[in-house]
Structures are given as C-alpha cells and as structure tokens.
Amino acid sequence: MKTQTSPIQTKIIDGKAHAARVTEEIREKVSLFQQHHQTTPGLAVILVGNDPASEVYVRNKAIQTHKAGMRSFMHMLPASTSEAHLLTLVERLNNDPEIHGILVQLPLPEGINPTTIIQGIAPHKDVDGLHATNAGKLALNLPGGIIPCTPLGCLLLLQSEIESMRGLHAVVVGASNLVGKPMAQLLLQQGCTVSIAHIDTRNPAEIAQQGDILVVATGNKELVRRHWIKPGATIIDVGITRIPTEDGKTRLVGDVTFEEALGVAGRITPVPGGVGPMTIACLLRNTLTAAELQLDTKD
Amino acid sequence: MKTQTSPIQTKIIDGKAHAARVTEEIREKVSLFQQHHQTTPGLAVILVGNDPASEVYVRNKAIQTHKAGMRSFMHMLPASTSEAHLLTLVERLNNDPEIHGILVQLPLPEGINPTTIIQGIAPHKDVDGLHATNAGKLALNLPGGIIPCTPLGCLLLLQSEIESMRGLHAVVVGASNLVGKPMAQLLLQQGCTVSIAHIDTRNPAEIAQQGDILVVATGNKELVRRHWIKPGATIIDVGITRIPTEDGKTRLVGDVTFEEALGVAGRITPVPGGVGPMTIACLLRNTLTAAELQLDTKD
C-alpha cells in the first residue's frame, strides 16, 4: 500500500444545498406543468399506526410537497386498519385523477403484508419506485419508470460531483430493495464496474477498499472504518442512526465513521445534511415525474 | 500469492447430463399437469425473417418442447412483417388459452422495435423472462415471475455443484439484460457478494480473479485467460462463438480459454455441452412454469 505523504483534503458534499437546488427546479417545473395541463400534481401519503418517527417523516414530506407548489393529501389511519381496507383505499387513489403519486409509509403494522399493498399501487403512481414494473424498467433500462427516491438522490449527488462515472469501480454496501439493489442498477447504467457487499460478505473491508465510489446503506452505524476506504474515494453515506452522547443528549451518525474518513476520502456526504434532504427532494421530483407520465401520454 | 504445488484436477461440468435430468423432470411434471388440468402446456415460437442460425434455434426449441410432452406452435413470418402485424399476433396469442408461453426469437429485423414486441407479451406468458414485470419480480425477489432461461440454467448448474453459495464472491462478466444482469440478481439472492464487470471495466482480470464463482457472458471469444481465474473457482462459460480451424473446418469456443482454465479452475462448463443444453431445458421449465401460473390461480 502506498503511504499517504500529505493527507487528502476531503470535500464535504452539501446535501442540503443540492436538495434546495433540486427543489427549486421542481417548483419551476410544477408551475410550467400547471400552465400546460391546467392541473396541479397531487401526492397522497398514507400512514397506518402511530410510529412517532414515521409521523415526523410523513409530515415533513407533506410540507415539502406543498412548498414545491403541489397538492398534498394525508391519510392517517389507525394501527387496527385491515389489509383489505388499506388496499381499497389504494385502489380508490389509483383511480382518482387528482392524485398523481401515492406513498405508503413503511413499516406497516403487523397483519398487513407490505408487498400486497405496494404491488397494489398503480405503477405510474408509485412514487417510491417499489412496484415490480418500476423495478423491472430500472433493471432493463427502459423509459417511463419511477426510480426509488434515495438511490435517485445518491445518483444526483454523484452526478453533480463526478463528470463521468464510466469505468469507475462503484461498491454498494447493503443489498436492500429500497436502496442497495436499485443503486447498483443506476451505477451499472452509468458504466461503473459494480460490486455489491452485504451482511453475508466475508471480506467487506477488502471489497469496499476497491471503490472509487462507495455507497453505504446498511443501517449499521459507523460500520465503515478508515481502512475500508480507497484514498480519494467519493463516499455516499445513506445510513442514519441516533446515538446517545456523553452529555445525555443524542446525535445522528451514518454508516461511515465520519472522522476516520476525513483525510482519506476525496468527498463524503455528512450525516445529517447529506443524503436525507436529497431523498425528500427526489420524492418531489418523482411526484412530478408521475404526474407527467399520467398527463403527457393523454396529450 | 500462494504457489500452486500440485495442479488442481478441474472437473468438467456435464451440461448435457444435467439438461437431460431437468428435461426428464419436466416431462414427468407435464404429465401430472395434464392429469390435473386436463390441458397440455403450449409454447408459441415466433420467428421473423430468414436468419439461418435463428431457424436452427427455433426448430430445436420446438422439437425439445414436443419431446417434453408439450405442444409447440411455430409462427414463421417473412422479414417484411410490420411491427403492427407482429404486435397483433402477440396480442392474439396473449388471449389464446391454448398458448401458455410465447417466445419471440431475437434478433428481430430492422424496423421492428424489439422492446415494443417483448413488452407486449403478457408477463405470465413471457417464457424468456424479459418483460419488465418479470425483471422487476426477479429484482425484488417476489414470487410469480419468470426468470430468463440462460441465467436460470447457470443457476441450476451452480446449485448442483455447490451446496451453499452464501458468502461466496461471484463475479459476472457481461451486463446484458438477457444474461449478466439477471444472473447478478440470482447470485445476490443466493447470498453471494456480487461484482459485475463489463465492456467499460478497466481491470477485468483483477475483478475476475476474486471470483469463487465466475460467470462469463460477453460473446467475446476466449476473453478469460489463466491469470483471470482464482484457483479452485467454479466457471460458467455462457459464450459460444464459431471459429475456423487450421484444417478448414470450424469449432465452437466459449468466452473462456478452456485449455488455460484446466488445472486452475475447480470446475468449468465446456463449450459446447455446458450452458447451451441447460438454456433449452430451462425454456421447457419456463413453459411449464408459465402454464402453472395461468392455470393454478384459476383453481
């Protein structure tokens, strides 16, 4: 291994600033959409049960949607809601011309099969990009699909930092349907060599070390240490975990040990203020995309 | 690197024998299916134009289907067939209860968009597994999908040779929609760490060297040389190219330089007689799967 004579000056990627720029673009496009179609994109957000974290998330999503000039409809249902009832609501929203995007906040209470509900959403209204049709369009690189918000946000951050990813080795740590797997597809489309490590990977540090780009989405706090990082790598840290601090308060940390990455990584997203704001900005973008998919084909 | 004191005795994986076993299983299951449903699975194969290689392929597919106890319907259309006409045929077959599987032989003549045709096949009749719904079910690990024949065949070969793939590093060389990308999904589902190399990969040998499992599907004859191979690796060679020999004849070679792999690889599929026979066996399997998807839900 080469000895690092002078430490790298690690750039902190400002997710908030990027997200603000994306949101402003969406706001302008929403305005044009309204003029063109005489209608306003509408997002329906469904929350079942009383998980406090989920309540904060959906409220924030609704506020941001509204700020971007779109309509936002909240459906807050009790934890006792049946799967059949929820499915009926989804089907009603599928057929409602005022609703262009449907988001069902996960996790759902026990007794409701999330797959049944998510696959019940009309693909062109599935702003989370979790319907099989959307996952398939992503896998096959077909147009007209909707890409999950978090990996889409990570891609936009990478594209703003790296002119061309073609031929770079991208390592994705975490293989979830929501982040890791669609992220790997997006990086393949960019021409990256892609490696996917996960819970069963025997030598995760050795795999991660190869990444010119390293996207980490495991929910395993501060998993990635200094020796996992290729000098100069661009790191996208999707994880977010709240931990107690010595003074009895709490703070948020990512899947990467941030302090150890400084001086080794070329660029890194902070937690908070990195991927999080971009995920919400991409939800707004997906809502507009969904509205365009529904309205533009009718022209 | 460890010096290899005694060369490895490379096992040649007998694809023909495996395919014969799969085909025999299908034949028995077809017989049970007939008893249960009072109907015989039927496969429609569509060939447009006069490509001689394609003619050989579809004839072989039809014969094998028939041998497995299923019905086989050939539609051989002139190269002048319009996209609209072909789409109408596909839609008629989608609605024909005697047809359970539809296969459109690729490549199609210029002037016909293959995406339009393939995405026009009903997902549960799409025995090539190329419809977005099937690609999405594979990506999300959802039931009820159909997996492309070649990667499915490769998976069955691997499963017959390796008891558990969990934690093994699998390297896929080639990132096509038909083989490389679905193969990567299948290996992820098996718990492998997965790396995908392709035309833009800068250090393919170094990536390939990491593979406990190495699946090569590039169509680039004898691309993989001895130094690409991890000692003891299991190699699945999907490539098949006809090359001239010194005596004025021709022979088939794979994407792996077979002679160089001997003594290094733990196991390897030969070309011919490796993946090829398994692809056809999996077409039969997919036709039965398609028939089950259509009939079992009606019970």
Image (cartoon, coloured by chain):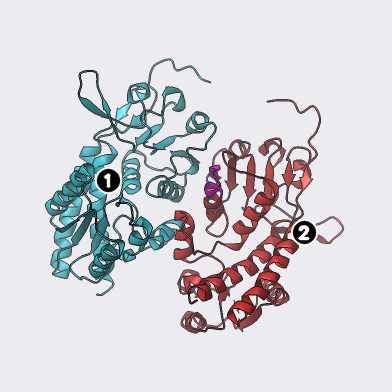
Chain colours: A red, B cyan
On the image, the x and y values in percent for residue A22 come to: 70, 63
Magenta-tinted stretch: A187-203
- Tell me the quarter of the picture where residue B286 sits: bottom left
The CA span between labels 2 and 1 is 50 Å
Q: How many numbered discs, if any?
A: 2
Q: Amino acid at mark 2?
A: Ala
Q: Is residue A88 left or right of residue A169?
A: left
Residue position for label 2: A17
Check the image and report above or below for A84 versus B101.
below
Please rate how many residues cluster around mark 1, counting C-alpha atoms within 10 Å: few if below 14, some from 14 to 19, many from 20: many
Check the image and report above or below for A144 versus B114.
below
Please rate how many residues cluster around mark 2, counting C-alpha atoms within 10 Å: few if below 14, some from 14 to 19, many from 20: some
Indicate which disc residue A156 carries: none
Q: Chain of mark 1?
A: B
Q: Is residue A53 visible?
A: no
Q: Is residue B69 visible?
A: yes
Q: Residue furthest top?
A: B5
For the residue pair A263 and A19, the one nearer the viewer reads as A19
